[in-house]
Amino acid sequence: MRKYVGMLIIAGLISNIASASLVTPVISNGEFEGTGDDWRLYGGGMGLGLGDPFNGSSSINFDATNWTGGDYGFDRWGTMIDLGGTDNTIFSFAAKNNNPALGNRIALQLVEFNGTQAAPNLTAADEVHYFDTGAPGSWTEFQVPYAVRNPATTMVNVMFKYYSTSDNVSYTLSAGNYNIDSVQTIPEPATMGLVAVFGIALFGVRRILG
């Protein structure tokens, strides 16, 4: 009897862990289907519009060609991404450089917070990733493995900016014009592998229990 009770407990634990592992943060309106809702544009000389899609019917055109100086960005302030208890995920997006003559790169900046959307508290400073989109006018898809840096973090601000560099070490905020699309999170391969292992183990336990 104890054997079967133990197996039932193990089966329950495996099921709970597997379910938790499948939690993936959701980014609303990451496909920009006809709107820029849930995103914020700030800074001088910024422009925002719809462009040709990577997926779906449209992308967002984030135009900083006429940037007037000072800080700027295109981000999720006020609608930050709820991590839902996840410690690791992958941020993915597609980008196309509309003005390669400016010689810049698109950057994805991830900033951690807790608290509420209306009153957020910073828990970890910017983690910045710089990308060269390659051929002018062509879409490139990027993925950024992300591990939460502060256990107190509950949400992340996803931010896009443009930077220039001459040595791939020092980066300076600059003008730019890109289309952005398909901003989303996907489970880590390791997480999916873990879920598969738990699934196999759960199947084995169920076989033993008949």
Image (cartoon, helix red, strand yellow):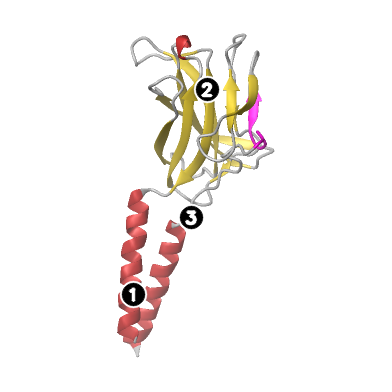
> Badge 3 is on which residue?
23
The amino acid beneath tag 2 is Tyr
Q: Could you say whether the residue bearing mark 1 is in a helix, strand or loop?
A: helix
Can residue 46 be seen by looking at this rendering? yes
Q: Earlier in the sequence, mark 3 or mark 1?
A: 3
x and y percent of residue 144 in the render?
Answer: 40, 36
CA neighbours of label 1 inside 10 A, class few (<14), some (14 to 19), many (20+): few
Of marks 3 and 2, which one's residue comes earlier in the chain? Answer: 3
Whether residue 95 is situated above or below residue 80 in the rendered picture: above
Q: Position of residue 129 (x, y in %)?
A: 42, 27
**Residue 163: % across, % down:** 47, 16
- Most common secondary structure along the magenta stretch: loop
Position of 86 relative to 12 (above/below): above
Q: Secondary structure at mark 2?
A: strand
Residue 100 in the image: state x and y as whole percent: 45, 14
Q: Quadrant of residue 7?
A: bottom left
- C-alpha gap between disc 3 and disc 1: 21 Å
Q: Does residue 36 show up magenta in the picture?
A: yes
Q: Which residue is mark 2?
A: 178
Packing grade of label 3 (10 A; few <14, some 14-19, many >=20) is some
Question: Which residue corresponds to the image point at 50% horizontal and 42% vertical from the top-left?
Answer: 184
Q: Are marks 1 and 2 in contact (CB under 8 Å)?
A: no
Q: Is residue 130 left or right of residue 61?
A: left
Which segment is the magenta one? Answer: 34-41
> From mark 1 to mark 2, how far is it between C-alphas?
48 Å
Vertically, is 116 above or below 166? below
The residue singled out by tag 1 in the image is: 203
